[in-house]
Image (cartoon, rainbow, N blue to C red):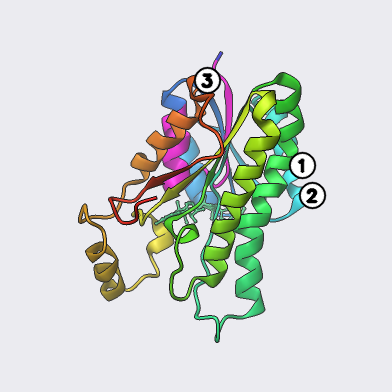
Amino acid sequence: MGRVALVTGGTRGIGAACSKALKDAGYNVAASYAGNDDAANAFKAETGIPVFKWDVGDYAACEKGVAAVEAEVGPVEVLVNNAGISRDAMLNKMTPEQWSEVMRTNLDSVFNVTRQVINGMRDRKFGRIISISSINGQQGMLGLSNYCAAKAGMIGFTRTLALEGARKGITANAIAPGYVATELLSGVSEKVMEAIVGQIPVGRLGEAEEVARCVVFLAADEAAWITGSTLTINGGQLAD
Ligand code: NDP
């Protein structure tokens, strides 16, 4: 039997690629999502991976959601904190709602979900916690103060979790992808997209599957000595 992996936001985009790659690598995967039932059902039909609907920004919902995953699939050994949104605006126009929606979905979620699995991982002396941060957690970006703050916060969270889990067989790592072709970028205008691609030395957006390869690498039992790191994957855009 393979290890159990939970991918939040695991039904679309980067998360879906992670869910599939982990399944192909032999894991028993559960994928969570927020509300897009059509996408989740299509994903489930295509992959056979069970899907679980709850809001990762809501602590009580995470308690129930992770309990449902563990009852159906088993104790979570690999957690991929992937669910995320963007609500872009320059700070002088950003609303409190845009700020807090991003903070709760992208950063509170990491506490909310990891908190549900950490004691089991400590008891079993094995865990892999992989959080999908962003190049925009490593640098500033116009109009993304909420997103950059949340993504940088994930890196700080990861470094602390690495220390706390170090003697318990638990690793915690972040992945910082550059721009990846998913629906998250669907709101970006063609002109801005051209400028973004123009700044990527490799000359193209990343593929979700390329991020998923990093997740499988960090999830492995053999990756036990990699912890507290941020794996940068961005086509050469930012050296870190
Ligand atoms: P998508 O918009 O394609 O998919 C987002 C996924 O997250 C969906 O499954 C969605 O569920 C789920 N989700 C959103 N909000 C919640 C919530 N409140 N509770 C539970 N699930 C939720 O995003 P991407 O694949 O592009 O992004 C995935 C992660 O990678 C994000 O954290 C993003 O910030 C990060 N990232 C993305 C980059 C990019 O260029 N695309 C670059 C760097 C980082 P549903 O389908 O129900 O809406």
> Which residue was labeled with disc 3?
221
Q: Which residue is rendered at x = 50% and y = 81% of the image?
A: 90
Rendered position, 50 above or below 144: above
Q: Which secondary structure, mark 1?
A: helix
Per the rendered image, the range of residues in magenta is: 2-22
Say which residue label 1 marks.
64
- The kind of residue on which mark 3 rests is Asp
Distance from mark 1 CB to nearest ligand 1 atom below 8 Å: no
Nearer-N-terminus badge (3/2): 2
Residue 47 shows up from this direction:
no
Q: In which quarter of the image is residue 100?
A: bottom right
Amino acid type shown at disc 1 = Lys
Q: In which quarter of the image is the N terminus?
A: top right
Q: Is residue 87 above or below residue 125?
A: below
Residue 26 belongs to magenta span? no
Give how far across and how far down residue 110 sits, in percent. 65, 48
Residue shown at 63% from the left, 67% from the top? 101
How many numbered tags mark residues here?
A: 3
From the top left corner, tell me how far across and down residue 81 is, in percent: 57, 44
Mark 2, residue position: 60
Q: Which amino acid does label 2 sit on?
A: Ala
